[in-house]
Image (cartoon, grey):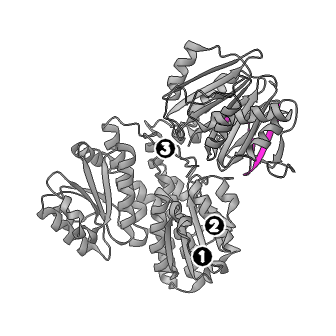
Amino acid sequence: MCGIVGYIGKREAYPIIINGLKRLEYRGYDSAGIALFDGTQIQLSKTQGKVSDLEKRVSQEIETKGSLGIGHTRWATHGVPNDVNSHPHYSNSGDLVIIHNGIIENYASIKKELINRGYTFKSDTDTEVLVNLIEEIKKQENVKLGKAVQIALNQVVGAYAIALFDKNKPDEIVVAKLGSPLAIGIGDDEFFVASDATPFIEFTNNAIYLEDEEMAIVRRGRDVKVRKIKSDNVVDPYVQELQLNIEQIEKGGYDHFMLKEIYEQPSVIKDTYRGRLLADKGIVKLGGLEDYIKKFTNANRIIIVACGTSWHAGLVAEYIFEDLARIPVEVEYASEFRYRNPIITEKDVVIAISQSGETADTLAAIKLAKEKGAFVYGVCNVVGSTISRETHSGTYTHAGPEIGVASTKAFTTQITVLMMIALRLAKAKGTISQRDYMEHLQELDTIPNKVEEALSGDEKIKEIAAKYKDAANFLYLGRGYNFPVALEGALKLKEISYIHAEGYPAAEMKHGPIALIDEQMPVVVIAVNSNHYEKVVSNIEEIKARKGKIIAVVTEGDTQVKELADYIMEVPKTPESLSPLVTTIPLQLLSYHIAVMLDKNVDQPRNLAKSVTVE
């Protein structure tokens, strides 16, 4: 949620900041703004809407001169999305200007005290309260900006990533982090500040990622100075060499990032198991797992915590781990986990799954699990993210940057990692025969080709999308390993087309949802060859008897379901435990095409954010 970009150096700041904001659009936002300093005055422009709207307003309102500036995309928390509540925000004197991601939970009491001291407020935001608190401390304590920020942040409760500057000190930007990510790019007598590295990757490959409760003074002509906010201890920052490149974050000829990422799945699944899976030699080896294999094999149970699409990947993993490794698994919404006083012991292993590695609810669940003594293992995509640092160990998915808000390749690469973990544990525990083990390895090695084959049905899926794009509701049904895929298919449709959709276990249809079925209701049924095939066929018969419209995902060459369904989407024959990796493909494409036909913003759906860094 929200995006921060800042620059101080020898170049013109405006083009760097505006292009950086465009790179961060994937995070989800409802307004945007920018503040530039030309050495004399702060030029500020902000607006509800997109970065393109900001560009138009800037061209009409302000001069774009200056080598110091900050920019922001806001996802509304305190105060409705409008021009006034957009960031950046001034202090009352007009000397300080700030941008902020996160939430200041005790802002109301601070605001009341500042009003009593004569401060006035133009917006409804907690951010304007924070910048004025900093100004008041700076004035009353007679301290420099950095110290005032430190004192203020020790008084607030909540989460934040902030960047601010003082027009009277045009050579520095002060930044700080708790809960929301913040990176500092280090160039040649220039510095970049951003929510992630994408806004500055073409300028430098060197970056510092602030840890929670750290702040930094970014000043031209000096090294970045990092301190702990609470203790004031100086921190020796780790400068990380970035592996990202521009091509990874461009559309590459596709109409949308989401479509590009759907089509990248054959290659990124291969990237995820490359060097880790040697099918012909019977080897699965994950660096983050090998040193802790006994933690898993001796565990009483595995608890998986995640949100959204990652939670669906966790549900698939529940089937995989229990089936292959015979370890009890519980899958929890991270957002609910810590609020129900869960029973966690030192004999538990907690697997935290997150694409961004910054999901606030998942981080809170990790913190609780560690406090209770559990071993915590992370599965995430973003190298250097908070979850990768906060967990005891873990595995990266290697999906590459996922820009589309609706997750696609993250889902399939997460399942790939979780399958490799389960196979390695099953082998270690002796719960899988050598024959089944080798078959699983060999089949996993063929998945990229099978995903490629599933993608070849795109034109047929586009025809189905045209037929049902105006439906008001969809029902998605699956059984066993493909029940979570039904949930994920329904989520994708909701996210990007805004059509109401629900996923259910197919057998649950008779326990309520069947009342919804009529001639207007499209029902997407995952009916691939599996142990449940005949049961699913019976469910399809029940739908057909009530005049529901049946769209079925079937195994290539299927004839029985083909006779019953209105439309079919074929996928290659795949073992049931690996089938979610191919059955999800047509559901992703169906959602994408429906959304495009309805003229929705596929990559940036309304109200959604890619990286959910607040509760």
Disc 1 residue type (three-letter): Ile
Residue bearing the label numbered 2: 368
Q: Magenta residues, as a range?
A: 200-219
Whole-percent x, y for residue 559 in the image: 20, 65
Q: To which quarter of the image does residue 600 belong?
A: top left
Q: CA distance from mark 1 to mark 3?
A: 35 Å
Q: CA distance from mark 2 to mark 3?
A: 30 Å
Task: Specify which label sits upstream in the sequence, 2 or 3.
Answer: 2
Whole-percent x, y for residue 337 in the image: 53, 66
Q: For mark 2, give the secondary structure.
A: helix
Is 403 rendered above or below residue 559?
Answer: above
> Taking the image as drawn, is residue 209 in sight?
no
Q: In the rendered view, does 207 fall on the left or right side of 34? A: right
> Taking the image as drawn, is residue 565 in sight?
yes
Q: Residues within 10 Å of mark 2 (few under 14, many from 20)?
A: some
Tell me whether circle 2 and circle 3 mark residues in contact (CB < 8 Å). Answer: no
Disc 3 residue type (three-letter): Gly
Whole-percent x, y for residue 42 in the image: 70, 19
Residue 220: mark: none
Q: For mark 1, give the secondary structure.
A: loop
Disc 2 residue type (three-letter): Leu
Query: Looking at this view, is 554 or 614 the one in front?
Result: 614
- Residue 217, magenta (yes or no): yes
Residue 344: mark: 1
Residue bearing the label numbered 3: 404
Q: Quadrant of the N terminus?
A: top right
